[in-house]
Amino acid sequence: MSEPTRPSPPGRWAWRRWLPLAVRVVVLGAIGVWLWRGADLSALADALRRVPPLTLAACFGLGLVNVVNAGYRWRLLMRAFGAAPLPSVRSLVRLMAVGLFYNTYVPGSVGGDVVRGVVSRRNFDTAAASYVVVALERLIGLSALGLVFLVGLATAPPLLDYRAVAPWIGGLVLLGVGILIAARASGRLAGWWGQIPRVSRATDLVVAFAVSIVGHSINILMFFMFARALGIGVSLATLAVVTPLAFVAAVLPLAIAGIGPREAALVGLLGMAGVEAAEALAMSLAYAAVLLAVAGIGGLLQLLGVGLKLDSDTSRSSEGAPPPG
């Protein structure tokens, strides 16, 4: 008879549970110190006071439009991969709002995606297919963001010497390729690939990509409105370069609503365009306030018990065109 395994001494591995929190505290603390030392707090307060409530209200409305836009894109992808029954746009928008609440208020930025994957499982033949579709939705959105960034690079005045950062970009690309090769060699990537449902409507993928472009353009427009309210002479093309990088930084699983990494990216990049640190920080904090308010709607919907229900679209078949978002 084998001897029973002895339990680990209390607290031996406890540091593993606290390590992610410790990393977040250290990184966010360093970002906070850098922002605090680089921005005049009185100038920041003055810049925040200069943001008109009407601009905040208009951007809040645009944020709600983006939630509807995202729900419509999700329905396109579900239809493209043969979801049945096909949920209505209204129910997908509600669930998208709840997902945004979790992605915004819970560190990690993926909690809402997990919730959406769980709720939409019954609409696919396999349970894993719903998660794969949600992941592909993220990838399509990221690809569209990359296109916006490239358009900005082609039209905006240069902010930095791209030859200096080319080795870093190349290194990241090689790292990504290496990860894919390692995953493929282990068979894990093949397993995930086998879970992807068959595409039944390829045109919906193209439309979903275009809808993602619209959503990113709305976000850039919000920053442009804040810039105009603060009297900052930054162009839409420059914002098309800066904001995608800031959004990528905000996805890092460090803080709530991406606050911290996004601000650091915006202050640093807009500083290259001649924008004062206090004004760039005010723009980012105003956007964060709008994001928190919009995401709060999803929390309210779940509190009322209406956010996690998917209703089938009985007004038209899944073969017909989806109702406009």
Image (cartoon, helix red, strand yellow):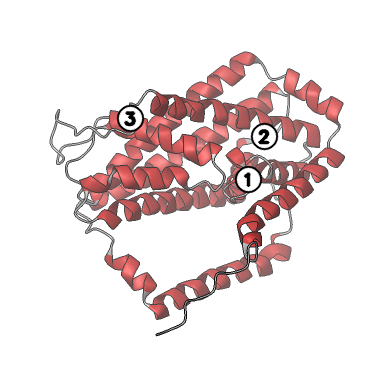
What residue lies at 41% left-to-right and 79% top-to-bottom? 186
Residue 211 in view (yes/no): yes
Q: How many marks?
A: 3
Q: What element carries label 3?
A: loop
Q: Quadrant of the C terminus?
A: top left
Q: Which of 325 and 13 is in front in this view?
A: 13
Residue 12 place in picture, x, y as percent: 65, 66
Q: Is residue 262 left or right of residue 118?
A: right
**Could you give the CA–CA distance between mark 3 and mark 1, rounded to whole angstroms?**
27 Å
Q: In this view, does 225 lie to the left or right of 296?
A: right
Q: What crowding class fits label 1: few (fewer than 14 Cα within 10 Å), some (14-19), or many (20 or more)? A: many
Residue type (three-letter) at the residue carrying disc 2: Ser
Where is 275 relative to 272, above or below?
above
Q: Is mark 1 on a helix, strand or loop?
A: helix
What residue lies at 68% left-to-right and 28% top-to-bottom? 227
Where is 181 relative to 254, above or below?
below
Q: What crowding class fits label 2: few (fewer than 14 Cα within 10 Å), some (14-19), or many (20 or more)? A: many
Query: According to the image, label 3 marks what residue?
Result: 325
Q: Which of marks 2 and 1 is nearer the N terminus?
A: 1
Q: What crowding class fits label 3: few (fewer than 14 Cα within 10 Å), some (14-19), or many (20 or more)? A: some
Residue type (three-letter) at the residue carrying disc 1: Ala
Residue 50 place in picture, x, y as percent: 73, 18
Q: Quadrant of the N terminus?
A: bottom left
Q: Given contact means CB atoms under 8 Å apart, are the residues at marks 2 and 1 in contact?
A: yes
Residue 276 in view (yes/no): no
Query: According to the image, label 1 marks what residue?
Result: 246
**Residue 250 image-quadrant placement:** top right
Query: According to the image, label 2 marks what residue?
Result: 284
**Could you give the CA–CA distance between mark 3 and mark 2, rounded to whole angstroms?**
27 Å
What residue lies at 79% left-to-right and 41% top-to-bottom? 35
Residue type (three-letter) at the residue carrying disc 3: Gly
Residue 147 place in picture, x, y as percent: 49, 51
